[in-house]
Amino acid sequence: MSSLEGAAPRGWRLLAYALPAFVVALPTIPVYIHLPSLYGVQLGVGLATTGYILLAARMFDAITDPLVGIFCDRLKFKGLRRKPWIAVGALIAGYGLYKILNPYAGITGGYLLIWSLVLYAGWTMVAVPYLAWGAELSTDYHERTRITAWREGLGLLGIVGAGVLGAVTVSLGWSEADSIGAIAWAAITLGAIVIPLLLSSLPEGTDRSDRTDDESQSLADNLRALVRNKPFLRLLSAWFLNGVANGIPAALFFLYLEHGLGAGDGIRPLFVLSYFVAAIVSIPLWLYLSGKLGKHRAWCWGMIAACVAFISVPWIEPGNFAIFGIVCVVTGMALGADLALPPALQADVTDYAKLRSGRYQTGLQFALWGMSTKLALAVAVGLALPSLEILGFDPEIPSDTGRQALIVIYALIPVVIKALAILVVWQFPLTAHVQSVIRQRLGRREIRST
């Protein structure tokens, strides 16, 4: 029996695995939302310069994903592939986070560039092996969903927690810089507790049947094996399409609230909160439905629910906050499906890769998964904002035509893209039965190889 096939983590061990997701998510809002204002305006770097620097840093972030994925699959330190990367990456990310969210007066753009690169490098060194490790904690179809659900649920709690902490510190009269600095310290302090707990509590999954000398395989060999993995390409395509569909309304959310719905500053945070809380609360529902319908079908129904909610948006009258609140709850529940189910499907794809090519490519696959997420968000912004301008939307003097363009791009274009994602994944071949057969065949191969 493979050591991968031991009992899946439960109780405090499962919590030990999932808690780092909470910590990693805490600084997400400060890094992605507050940095442009902090550096571009308050610290005097300039909006254009800040924008170019952050674009370069995020391009670097996307490129490093597959590199870390390949190396954490191929390289070992004392027989371990995941833990060393997480340990070193956490130290790098923690220091980078401290530096970038606690700048001193008089810094230049060079400071922002250097510490952005350090932070993103550390984050990638943690995130890629962390996701791959989660896929290796169990070989059971349904247990993988439970592990992923815990991880993603705590990640959502981290985002909500950062919002609450930021709101509390601002209400106490703290400056924006001091507020996001507090979030950085909270993440660093909690990380110093949960990362050692993770590394000491759980064994790293290894597979004795993995007789292929992965270190001797060239990068070209690994990529050719990946291209031949049709379920991986199919799942990655659906994930990318759905990421673009989610990214467009995210990029236009506050524009729609102001110019489409007429929501003031006081009520906007409630829509954001209801969205994320609905995602967290819905995760047990998606766990139940995945057990009844299969992971890919449950995910499809989550996307269908989001489509139904978005289709209603053009008929929502300005000021009808209650109806749009329902839309936020339904789309938030769909986000719960997006986060809990596809990564668990990706874990099943790694078994198929092992059966077909004789090697696990878990790190590389999850690295490309992360890279796809970042590219999808970039494509969404690149499509949404220029399209608004081309169609005549002017936020300073919005016309009726401009508002209609905003609503169509915000609500209806994502429906079309999600429909394509549903078509791609509806007949996904790796069902619970198929995955069970794959594991049986891998088990027989292990026995013959010992």
Image (tube, rainbow, N blue to C red):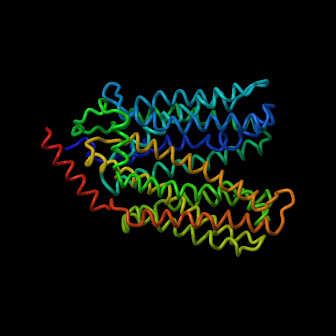
In the image: residue 60, left or right of residue 251? left
Position of the C terminus by quadrant = top left
* Residue at x 34% of width, y 36% of height: 204
Position in image of residue 444 (x %, y %) = 16, 48
Q: Whole-percent x and y of residue 96?
A: 60, 28
Residue 359 drawn above or below residue 404? above
Q: Is residue 144 left or right of residue 97?
A: left
Q: How many marks?
A: 0
Looking at the picture, does residue 339 appear above or below residue 220? below
Q: Position of residue 103 (x, y in %)?
A: 72, 28
Q: Left or right: where does residue 166 sit relative to residue 144?
A: right
Point 51% across, 34% down: residue:
64
Relative to 99, is 207 above or below? below
Residue that extends furthest to the right in the rendered view of this protein: 397
| Most foreground residue, 141 or 361 | 361
- Which quarter of the picture shows residue 86? top left
Query: Looking at the rendering, which quadrant does residue 385 occupy?
Result: bottom right
Residue 24, horizontal then vertical, whole percent: 55, 40
Please report the residue visible at 48 percent of the width from the left and 35 percent of the height from the top. 126
Which quadrant of the figure has residue 387?
Answer: bottom right
Quadrant holding the N terminus: top left
Nearer to me, 296 or 6: 296
